[in-house]
Image (cartoon, grey):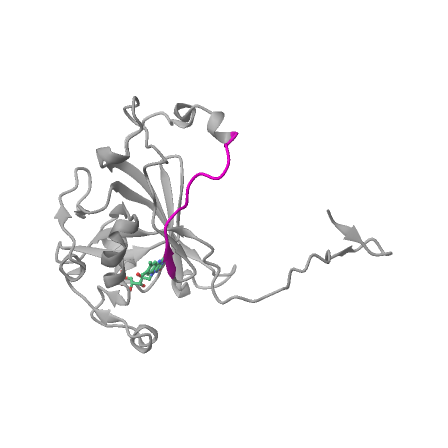
Amino acid sequence: MTSTDTAGIPTPQTTGHVAVDPAILYFGTPVVLLSSTNADGTTNLMPMSSVFWLGRSAVLGIGARSQTASNLRRNPELVLNLASPANVAHVDRLALTTGRPDVSPWKTRARYVHVADKFAAAGLTPLDSATVRPRRVAECLVHLEAVVRAIRPLGTRPGDDPESARQLTVEAHVTRVWVDPAIRLTGHADRIDPDLWRPLILSFQRFYGLGVEVHPSRLAGIDEDRYREPRTAS
Ligand SMILES: Cc1cc2nc3c(=O)[nH]c(=O)nc-3n(C[C@H](O)[C@H](O)[C@H](O)COP(=O)(O)O)c2cc1C
């Protein structure tokens, strides 16, 4: 409910909320290990969590100066390996690493180091993909192979040089979905059981799991197959 003052201008309600200015707004998103192809054909892994999906599209927020950004510009193929709490120690080993040999001054000050072989550094096992070149992470229960559809500057204003963007959005089209049978919904060929799939969540800079279901969902009354898009070539 909005209140207004005598001039009809909306005034903030007195709820006890306080206006704050956080440096980051990471209120909780799933953790992904993003596979992309290095110039020498090996696979780079980047832990990331600025991601959402709509239909078969994934939208990712990626630092413009990361190894991953340059890899995706050169070879527009990727795998989103979705992490669960069982993977958290591996993910954490990749924090503060970059595939770029020329570590930026900001990252150097934050104690990032260059790591050429992220699979070895994290103790993870590479698996060949079916539709793209970067390799999958065997230990993750979900792998989404995808191709890049668009890379756009994020955070620039009209008139700014798009090359000056410090962040990018990457829009990708998912070409193949792999899941461990342990998270499949019984009786359905193509569905995931959300009681069995527990994503790893990054909230601000810390790791959490997901709790149990908290309320019946009216949205869940819609048959999932109604969201299926007509199949198109990637
Ligand atoms: C759990 C986690 C989540 C992260 N999420 C993002 C993200 O969404 N976008 C991003 O640009 N960097 C994110 N980072 C930081 C990148 O992993 C970091 O910039 C890394 O150096 C990129 O690797 P690369 O240079 O080899 O591509 C995240 C790091 C961690 C540990």
**Residue 214: image x %, image y %?**
48, 39
In this view, the residue farthest toward the right is 6
Residue placed most toward the observer, 158 or 36: 36
**Residue 32: image x %, image y %?**
31, 50
Ligand 1 quadrant in view: bottom left
Which segment did they paint magenta? 206-218
**Residue 128: image x %, image y %?**
13, 43
Magenta region, main secondary structure: loop
Q: Is residue 40 left or right of residue 217?
A: left
**Position of the C terminus by quadrant:** top left
**Residue 60: image x %, image y %?**
37, 50
Looking at the image, which residue is at 63% across and 64% down?
19
Looking at the image, which residue is at 29% across and 57% down?
47
**Vertical arrangement, residue 228 with respect to residue 213, above or below:** above
**Vertical arrangement, residue 140 with respect to residue 107, above or below:** above
**Vertical arrangement, residue 63 with respect to residue 180, above or below:** below
In which quarter of the view is residue 176 placed? Answer: top left
In which quarter of the view is residue 187 placed? Answer: top left
The stretch drawn in magenta includes residue 175: no
Looking at the image, which residue is at 73% across and 56% down?
13
Q: Is residue 40 left or right of residue 190?
A: left
Q: How many numbered badges does the structure rendering display?
A: 0
In this view, the residue farthest toward the top is 187
Q: Is residue 211 left or right of residue 127?
A: right
Residue placed most toward the observer, 120 or 101: 120
**Vertical arrangement, residue 155 with respect to residue 192, above or below:** below
The stretch drawn in magenta includes residue 210: yes
